[in-house]
Image: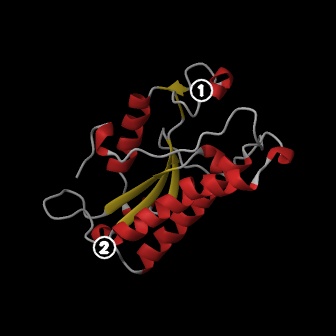
Amino acid sequence: MELTRASEIIPPVEYHIPEDTETTLSKVEKSSLLLTYEVNAVGPILAIKHMWPLLKTGGGSGTQRDVAVVANLSARVGSIGDNRLGGWHSYRSSKTALNQLTKTVSLEFARKKDPIVCILLHPGTVDTDLSKPFQRNVAEGKLFTKEFSVQKLLGIINNAKSSDNGKFFAWDGQEIPW
Protein backbone atom coordinates (compact mmCIF):
# COMPACT_ATOMS: atom_id res chain seq x y z
CA MET A 1 0.00 0.00 0.00
CA GLU A 2 1.40 3.36 -0.93
CA LEU A 3 0.72 6.16 1.51
CA THR A 4 -0.06 9.56 0.06
CA ARG A 5 -1.65 11.64 2.81
CA ALA A 6 -0.68 12.64 6.33
CA SER A 7 -4.01 11.24 7.59
CA GLU A 8 -2.82 7.74 6.62
CA ILE A 9 -0.08 7.92 9.24
CA ILE A 10 -0.68 7.33 12.92
CA PRO A 11 0.15 10.68 14.50
CA PRO A 12 3.20 10.61 16.79
CA VAL A 13 2.94 11.53 20.44
CA GLU A 14 5.75 13.75 21.56
CA TYR A 15 6.71 15.00 24.98
CA HIS A 16 7.27 18.74 24.94
CA ILE A 17 10.37 19.92 26.74
CA PRO A 18 10.04 23.49 28.01
CA GLU A 19 12.72 25.79 26.62
CA ASP A 20 14.41 26.44 29.95
CA THR A 21 14.86 22.82 31.01
CA GLU A 22 17.68 20.38 30.54
CA THR A 23 20.08 22.74 28.89
CA THR A 24 22.54 21.58 31.53
CA LEU A 25 23.01 18.45 33.61
CA SER A 26 21.95 20.29 36.76
CA LYS A 27 18.40 20.58 35.36
CA VAL A 28 17.91 16.87 34.60
CA GLU A 29 15.08 15.25 36.57
CA LYS A 30 14.27 11.57 36.93
CA SER A 31 10.60 12.21 36.12
CA SER A 32 11.49 13.90 32.78
CA LEU A 33 13.85 11.09 31.84
CA LEU A 34 11.28 8.37 32.57
CA LEU A 35 8.30 10.09 30.95
CA THR A 36 10.19 11.00 27.80
CA TYR A 37 11.64 7.50 27.47
CA GLU A 38 8.19 5.99 27.97
CA VAL A 39 6.59 8.15 25.29
CA ASN A 40 9.39 8.15 22.70
CA ALA A 41 10.90 4.67 23.09
CA VAL A 42 8.66 2.32 25.06
CA GLY A 43 5.44 3.19 23.22
CA PRO A 44 6.77 2.61 19.69
CA ILE A 45 8.53 -0.68 20.50
CA LEU A 46 5.43 -2.07 22.20
CA ALA A 47 3.33 -1.04 19.20
CA ILE A 48 5.72 -2.98 16.94
CA LYS A 49 5.58 -5.97 19.27
CA HIS A 50 1.80 -6.11 19.14
CA MET A 51 1.61 -5.41 15.39
CA TRP A 52 4.24 -8.05 14.59
CA PRO A 53 1.76 -10.78 13.57
CA LEU A 54 0.22 -8.40 11.03
CA LEU A 55 3.58 -7.07 9.87
CA LYS A 56 4.79 -10.61 9.10
CA THR A 57 2.38 -10.73 6.18
CA GLY A 58 4.63 -8.22 4.43
CA GLY A 59 2.98 -5.85 2.02
CA GLY A 60 -0.12 -8.03 2.01
CA SER A 61 -2.07 -9.43 -0.89
CA GLY A 62 -3.15 -6.99 -3.53
CA THR A 63 -0.29 -4.57 -2.86
CA GLN A 64 2.76 -3.75 -4.95
CA ARG A 65 5.01 -4.15 -1.92
CA ASP A 66 6.51 -7.43 -0.74
CA VAL A 67 7.59 -6.08 2.66
CA ALA A 68 5.86 -4.20 5.45
CA VAL A 69 7.55 -0.96 6.49
CA VAL A 70 7.84 0.18 10.09
CA ALA A 71 8.87 3.84 10.11
CA ASN A 72 9.57 5.31 13.53
CA LEU A 73 9.75 9.06 13.88
CA SER A 74 13.07 9.86 15.49
CA ALA A 75 15.12 13.06 15.52
CA ARG A 76 18.62 14.02 14.47
CA VAL A 77 19.29 14.90 18.12
CA GLY A 78 19.06 11.14 18.82
CA SER A 79 22.24 10.56 16.84
CA ILE A 80 25.26 10.09 19.10
CA GLY A 81 27.62 10.72 16.19
CA ASP A 82 25.87 13.97 15.25
CA ASN A 83 25.60 15.37 18.80
CA ARG A 84 27.48 18.65 18.70
CA LEU A 85 25.42 20.74 21.13
CA GLY A 86 24.52 18.54 24.10
CA GLY A 87 21.52 19.52 26.20
CA TRP A 88 17.97 18.19 25.91
CA HIS A 89 19.10 15.19 27.93
CA SER A 90 15.72 13.44 28.24
CA TYR A 91 14.50 14.05 24.69
CA ARG A 92 17.85 13.32 23.08
CA SER A 93 18.42 10.08 25.02
CA SER A 94 14.83 8.88 24.46
CA LYS A 95 15.30 9.23 20.69
CA THR A 96 18.67 7.45 20.95
CA ALA A 97 16.86 4.63 22.78
CA LEU A 98 14.21 4.52 20.04
CA ASN A 99 16.98 4.29 17.45
CA GLN A 100 18.63 1.38 19.28
CA LEU A 101 15.33 -0.47 19.82
CA THR A 102 14.34 -0.06 16.16
CA LYS A 103 17.77 -1.16 14.93
CA THR A 104 17.64 -4.19 17.26
CA VAL A 105 14.19 -5.28 16.12
CA SER A 106 15.21 -4.76 12.47
CA LEU A 107 17.99 -7.31 12.98
CA GLU A 108 15.62 -9.76 14.66
CA PHE A 109 13.13 -9.50 11.80
CA ALA A 110 15.92 -10.00 9.25
CA ARG A 111 17.29 -13.01 11.12
CA LYS A 112 13.80 -14.56 11.19
CA LYS A 113 13.36 -13.68 7.52
CA ASP A 114 10.20 -11.72 8.29
CA PRO A 115 9.27 -9.48 5.35
CA ILE A 116 9.56 -6.31 7.43
CA VAL A 117 11.76 -3.26 6.90
CA CYS A 118 12.31 -1.01 9.93
CA ILE A 119 13.55 2.52 9.37
CA LEU A 120 13.92 5.65 11.45
CA LEU A 121 13.03 9.07 10.12
CA HIS A 122 14.09 12.59 11.07
CA PRO A 123 11.41 15.00 9.80
CA GLY A 124 13.59 18.10 9.95
CA THR A 125 12.53 21.06 12.05
CA VAL A 126 8.78 21.21 11.61
CA ASP A 127 6.55 24.11 12.61
CA THR A 128 4.81 22.43 15.58
CA ASP A 129 4.25 23.15 19.25
CA LEU A 130 7.35 21.07 20.02
CA SER A 131 9.63 23.31 17.96
CA LYS A 132 7.99 26.69 18.75
CA PRO A 133 10.38 27.65 21.56
CA PHE A 134 13.42 26.89 19.38
CA GLN A 135 12.34 28.29 16.01
CA ARG A 136 14.29 31.54 16.40
CA ASN A 137 17.48 29.47 16.03
CA VAL A 138 16.38 27.71 12.82
CA ALA A 139 18.22 28.73 9.67
CA GLU A 140 16.29 30.42 6.87
CA GLY A 141 14.45 27.84 4.76
CA LYS A 142 14.93 25.05 7.33
CA LEU A 143 11.61 25.37 9.20
CA PHE A 144 9.22 23.08 7.39
CA THR A 145 5.47 22.92 7.24
CA LYS A 146 3.89 19.70 8.46
CA GLU A 147 2.68 18.98 4.94
CA PHE A 148 6.15 19.40 3.41
CA SER A 149 7.76 17.14 6.00
CA VAL A 150 5.08 14.46 5.71
CA GLN A 151 5.40 14.38 1.91
CA LYS A 152 9.18 14.00 2.19
CA LEU A 153 8.85 11.20 4.77
CA LEU A 154 6.18 9.42 2.72
CA GLY A 155 8.58 9.44 -0.22
CA ILE A 156 11.18 7.65 1.90
CA ILE A 157 8.64 5.18 3.29
CA ASN A 158 7.15 4.40 -0.11
CA ASN A 159 10.59 3.78 -1.60
CA ALA A 160 12.01 1.77 1.31
CA LYS A 161 13.59 -1.50 0.28
CA SER A 162 15.05 -4.46 2.15
CA SER A 163 18.54 -2.95 2.00
CA ASP A 164 17.25 0.05 4.02
CA ASN A 165 16.34 -2.15 6.99
CA GLY A 166 17.70 -0.69 10.24
CA LYS A 167 18.76 2.64 8.75
CA PHE A 168 18.17 6.20 9.99
CA PHE A 169 17.18 8.77 7.35
CA ALA A 170 16.71 12.54 7.33
CA TRP A 171 13.73 14.12 5.59
CA ASP A 172 15.84 14.59 2.45
CA GLY A 173 16.72 10.88 2.19
CA GLN A 174 20.27 11.27 3.52
CA GLU A 175 21.37 8.61 5.99
CA ILE A 176 22.11 9.91 9.49
CA PRO A 177 25.04 8.49 11.49
CA TRP A 178 24.29 6.60 14.68
Residue drawn 31% across and 73% down?
Answer: 53
* Dot 1 amino acid type: Lys
Q: Position of residue 44 (x, y in %)?
A: 47, 59
The residue at the far bottom in this view is 112
Whether residue 80 is visible here, answered yes or no, is no
Q: Earlier in the sequence, mark 2 or mark 1?
A: 2
> Label 1, on which residue?
132
Quarter holding residue 56: bottom left
Q: Position of residue 170 (x, y in %)?
A: 52, 43
Quadrant (top left/top right/bottom left/bottom right) for the C terminus: bottom right
Indicate whether 156 appears above or below 131. Answer: below
Give amino acid for label 2.
Answer: Pro
Q: Say which mark, if any, is on residue 53.
A: 2
Q: Does residue 45 appear to the left or right of 76 in the view shown?
A: left
Q: Residue farthest to the right? A: 26
Q: Residue at x 56, y 59 (%)?
A: 41
Q: Is residue 86 left or right of residue 113?
A: right
Q: Position of residue 54 (x, y in %)?
A: 28, 68
